[in-house]
Image (spheres, rainbow, N blue to C red):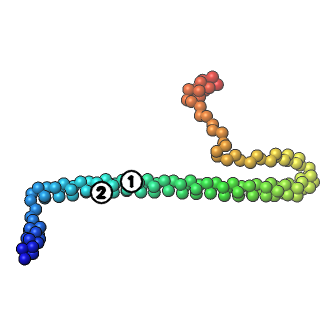
Amino acid sequence: MAALKNKATRKTRAATLEPTPRHLWLAALGVLVAGRRESLAAAKRAATRVENTIADARYALRRAEADLRAGVDGVRSQVEPRVQKLSGDVEARLAPIIAKLGLKPKTTRKARKPRKTATKAVRRTTRTPATRAAKKAAG
């Protein structure tokens, strides 16, 4: 029976342990450290999400612009030959009428060169105001 009494006293001692001011102080410090750590991690996660969203938006804009440019170039390559053909047909039909009226036929233009893409376009250098002023004074 003595063994039963010892077990009962251990349980009652553990259950009756009351927090001291030191325990409260350590618990408060633990809560502060954990709160600080979690707030820093939450701020870092939020900043990462914002950066990722901005990067995704930029990528989507670049893709949309590239698709639009490709579509415009495709339409241009289809329209230009048809316009030239139409122009030739109109000139061919008007040639007899112009000849009857005795007018001089218009000289035909050379075919235009296809437009360069934006990446291959040559940048124009801007003139400085000093150069403009010197030319104005001389002229």
Left or right of 58? Residue 33 is left
Q: Residue at x 58, y 57 (%)?
A: 64
Q: Does residue 27 appear anywhere in the picture?
A: yes
Label 1's element?
A: helix
Left or right of 4? Residue 86 is right
**Residue at the spot of label 2:** 38
Label 2's element?
A: helix
**Residue at the spot of label 1:** 47
* Image quadrant assignment for residue 71: bottom right
Q: Residue at x 41, y 57 (%)?
A: 49
Q: Does residue 94 appear anywhere in the picture?
A: no
Q: Residue at x 75, y 58 (%)?
A: 78
Distance from label 1 to label 2 (Cα)?
14 Å
The circle drawn on residue 90 is: none
| Image quadrant occupied by the C terminus | top right
Compared with 91, 137 (above or below) is: above
**Front-lying residue, 118 or 54:** 54
Q: Nearer the viewer, mark 1 or mark 2?
A: 2
- Residue 31, position as x, y percentages in the image: 21, 58
Which residue type carries mark 2? Glu
Which residue type carries mark 1? Ala
Compared with 135, 99 (above or below) is: below
- Residue 26, position as x, y percentages in the image: 16, 55
Q: Residue at x 45, y 55 (%)?
A: 52
**Front-lying residue, 126 or 93:** 126
Q: Which callout, 1 or 2, points at the residue further toward the start of the chain? A: 2
